Image: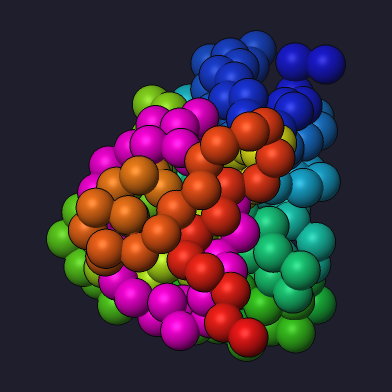
Amino acid sequence: PANETSVGEIRRVPHADGSVAAINTASKIEVALAETRRSVVLDRGEAWFQVAKDAKRPFVVEAGRVRVQAVGTAFSVRRRDDGADVLVTEGVVEAWADGAEGNRIRLIAGQSAFVADNAAIERAAAVPSSVDRKLAWRSGKIDLLGETLTGAIAEFNRYNQRQIVLADPALEAEQFDGVFRTDDPEGFAIAVKSALDVPVDVSGSGAIRIGESRR
């Protein structure tokens, strides 16, 4: 289906109202365009929306209990187990949890927040270019800046059937920078080997191992 992606697939889907969705790896959305409201349900994963302006028909994304509303703007929503991440690239959006409409956050371009299913809202510190880095997946890239090795590996594992395993827990908090293709976990592992001087095993077709297990 056009509104669903498999692991490693990134798809750009135009909608009848002129809006466009970019759907990230292993994600699924359901779109309903009505006369008074445009609704998208994010069943799983992550999607970025470029919303065609139509003041009479607000554009609302539902991710679990989280609601994100815009008129003419661009933003992404990533569903998590306990809420959703919201990142704004253009214009203004409002986000809240269903049943807690009084507690909503207003985000402008360059801002992001995590909205929990329990209605708690955590605004991310505004760091220049951080939103763009987090949306590098739209062009098939993973852009890491000061990311922990654990976080970086989790990102690569979203996009690839071939998983990366961190064999040495002592390396979990090591920080890593770089721009990589989403489909190149081997290249990332080799860069880690070079930067951190740790053993890496990319041989065979099984999991990629970084570091040696310590007994």
Residue in the image at 69% along x and 64% along y: 80
Residue that extends furthest to the left in the rendered view of this protein: 128
Q: Compare residues 26 and 91 and report the one nearer the observer.
A: 26
Residue in the image at 30% along x and 71% along y: 175
Q: Quick check: 52 left or right of 65?
A: left
Q: Compare residues 44 and 190 and report the one nearer the observer.
A: 190
Q: Compare residues 28 and 25 and report the one nearer the observer.
A: 25
Residue 28: x, y in percent? 77, 36
Does the magenta-highlighted stretch encompass residue 206? no
Residue 138: x, y in percent? 43, 31
Residue 206: x, y in percent? 70, 40
Can the viewer see residue 70 in this picture? Answer: no
Which quadrant does the N terminus fall into?
A: top right
Q: Quick check: 161 left or right of 190?
A: right
Which quadrant does the C terminus fall into?
A: bottom right
Residue 174: x, y in percent? 34, 75
Can the viewer see residue 63 in this picture? Answer: yes
Residues shaded magenta: 164-187
Residue 203 to residue 79: above or below: above
Residue 16 to residue 182: above or below: above
Residue 67 to residue 42: above or below: below
Does the magenta-highlighted stretch encompass residue 177? yes
Q: Compare residues 193 and 75 and report the one nearer the observer.
A: 193
Quadrant location of residue 148?
Answer: bottom left
